[in-house]
Amino acid sequence: TALPSHCGVLATMTPPGQPEEYFSSTEVILQNIPFHHKKKAVAALLRSVGLGGETYHSIEIPMMPSNRSNCGYAIVNFKDVRFANQCFQLLDNWKIGGSNQNVIRVVDRWGLVAADPSSAWHAR
């Protein structure tokens, strides 16, 4: 399904080399969140895996003004790269409500993710 144009497109850029960890940035994108989720629901999801409000600066969720639902992703700016890496380890492939429709994918700000820390980065 295509996103409305006002949701923006997450640009894929060349990553800055292969990092030693999953993420070298504090900003991660949670893809495939349910369209009805708001900031409180994403904060609750993070809290449920031990990443409470003390671990991040902000959660941004682009919204579609026409129907007040989100665009299917959230941007979380963590306070430290270690928390971003924990987010990947804990939430990548997380199923919301047991549904295969909403399997959370955690990617970096370039829309990239490592299959494991020793592999080369690849685009989704």
Image (cartoon, rainbow, N blue to C red):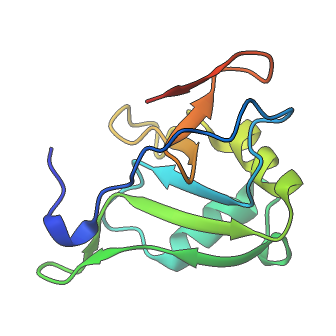
Q: Which residue is more in the foreground, 52 or 124?
A: 124
Image-quadrant location for residue 89: top right
In the rendered view, would you say 30 is above or below 42?
above
Q: Which residue is more in the foreground, 11 or 45?
A: 11
The residue that appears at 62% across and 66% down in the rendered structure is: 76
Image-quadrant location for residue 53: bottom right
Q: Which residue is more in the foreground, 13 or 105?
A: 13
Image-quadrant location for residue 35: bottom left
11 displayed left or right of 55: left
Q: Position of residue 100 (x, y in %)?
A: 37, 31
20 displayed left or right of 76: right
Q: Quadrant of the C terminus?
A: top left
The residue that appears at 48% across and 44% down in the rendered structure is: 13
Q: Quadrant of the N terminus?
A: top left
Q: Which residue is more in the foreground, 62 or 118?
A: 118
Q: Position of residue 107 (x, y in %)?
A: 56, 44
In the rendered view, would you say 8 is above or below 109?
below
75 displayed left or right of 27: left
* Image mark count: 0
The residue that appears at 75% across and 36% down in the rendered structure is: 22
Q: Residue furthest top?
A: 119
Q: Position of residue 71 (x, y in %)?
A: 29, 64
Q: Position of residue 49 (x, y in %)?
A: 76, 53
